[in-house]
Image (cartoon, coloured by chain):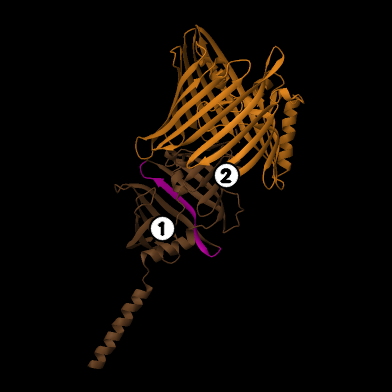
Chain colours: A brown, B orange
Amino acid sequence: MKRFLAFLAIFILLFTSSTFVHALTAEEIINKRDDNEYLETARAEMEMIIRSGRREMSKTMISLTDKQNSLTEFTNPRDRGTKFLKRGDELWMFFPDAEDIVKISGHMLNQGMMGSDFSYQDLMESDKLIDLYEFEIISEEEIDGRPCYVLEGLAREGKEVSYYKRKIWIDKERFVGLKEELYARSGRLLKELNVLQVEEIEGRWYPLRSVMEDKLRKDTSTEVILKAIEFNPLIPEGTFTLENLR
Amino acid sequence: MRKYLLLLLIFIFVGQVSAIEAGGEYAILANLSWHDGTYKTEISDFLNIDLFLPQVGNNEIQYSFIVTDPLLDLLEDKDAAYYTRKLYLRRKFDDFSLTVGRQPVSWAFGSLLNPVDYTPGSLVADRESSGKYTDALELYLPLEWNSGLSLLASYPGGFSTDFNKMKTGVRGRFGVGAFDLTLNYVQEAFSIRNSFFPRERLALTLKGDLKGMGVYAAFGHYFDDVLDSSNSLLLGIDYSYNLNYYTKITLQLEYLGLGNRSLSPVLGPFIFMNGRGDRLDLLSASLTYPVDDFSSISLMSMLNLDGSRIFISPVYQNTLSANIDLNLSGQVFFGEEYNFTSLSTGLTYSF
């Protein structure tokens, strides 16, 4: 009997310890997601389709980014040559006709960028999610047949974030976000992001097509299509400067 | 007609050389105005062409020109007027960059009016004049990522070896904390009875944020041997008010004080706001309401604080499909000597 109990104890210990070894924590899941989606440096070509009712407008752009900074140049006919330089918490804009460079006032940053459902602030949050939010796993669900971890993140004390709370659905196998809900401090749902297509590029899963919906407005959405991306390109010194914005 | 052949050749050339791209816009505008019971209608159009030439090494060439009334002149079998807005070469060296040729020189910092622009009145409340484009040589020295020094020599009256006909300027831009500070100096000649007199100006501008509000200011001092020395002062704020989480009304309010009537060219197309006395005190406001992602309504007004003049301009802007923008605006002016009202509509196609 003693031998049986000892065997049972060892079995329980092994079973539970193996469960602990394989169950990922929220932090580990977010870190794995960041391994795929967080950009140290990148060069991307994108198209943004802004929809409102049956109307739509397309904008194309080329963006260079590093951990804290980005330089975006619009290439579609209406906005061609318009550039944004995001440097830390500051945003500067270049108007091609007059070749003016103007610093954008802080209060403008939570407006929709160029009429889209993405605010300037959305684009300016460049920290890793784990540095901005404290996450916990709240459930597991399927999105389009793919099992996902559902994580809820609350803004860390003292961190300035655009959304107090975010819920993220992360693919359990590929560790890429498939859906995201962004909430105000009041608990009100502000925006919803749905990823329509992901692809493995240079060994990392990355969203190719996603749609952001502003839940406070009826019938509007902005689709972002990634046309090309290069991870970790060498960005020359002096790229994120006003001189280069000209 | 030769101009059209030239345009056609440019399009053919651009089509064949894939590295060169062309873009721009065509706009047609109609204006109905009445003044003292007299009505006047005016139709105009313009074609703006930008050629995007590939960068060769550290060299960049920009070429942009505007053809005024191309369609109207074609219908009337007239030669269209042509104006080069940009034709310059910029070369980046290790420590500086050099720009030579026709180029826009605008020292805007986000205000509706700018009393200390390189060319006063060349860009006022988003209305630009050809005065912004000048034949110039610019040397730009970057200091920090948000700081730099720009040295300019330009020829507003066309190239001349006469130093008196040259305009020179220096502008330093510095990031001071979260503020954008610029200091500038301009020397230009102005003529009285065919004699040229130098006129100098020293100015500073400041732009930043204060408790959720954008704040800016400009101060200019004009040294003048012939006329009295005088000052200009601009103080402004911009602020957004949330109607709901994402619908924001944006307000811009500014005061402009000019110490001398001779400085009134800074008003540009709003020169009619110049009042009775030698001094000008003007209050300007702009309010913008985004109707949706594609359209907005705005209201701009100016008030001469001596009570002699008021100007109000509502504007409706809508981005239609196929890269076409619709613009409807009204202009109402009440002055002591005369009033005027006008309605304008315009369609702009970007390509």
On the image, which quarter does residue B152 sit in?
A: top right
Q: Indicate whether A19 appears above or below B191.
A: below
Magenta span covers which residues? A202-216
Give the mark nearer the N terminus: 2 vs 1: 2
- Looking at the rendered image, the quarter that the N terminus of chain B falls into is top right
Q: Main secondary structure of the magenta part?
A: strand
Q: Residues within 10 Å of mark 1 (few under 14, many from 20)?
A: few
- Looking at the rendered image, the quarter that the C terminus of chain B falls into is top right
Mark 1 highlights which residue?
A: A131
Mark 2 highlights which residue?
A: A73
Residue contact at pointers 2 and 1, CB within 8 angstroms: no
| Residue A210 percent coordinates (x, y) | 46, 52
Q: Secondary structure at mark 1?
A: helix
Q: Indicate whether B241 appears above or below A178.
A: above
Does the image show residue A175?
no
Residue at 47% x, 52% y is A126
Q: Check disc 2 and give the amino acid type.
A: Glu
In the foreground, A149 or B184: B184
| Residue B233 percent coordinates (x, y) | 50, 24
Residue at 59% x, 49% y is A239
Q: Secondary structure at mark 2?
A: strand
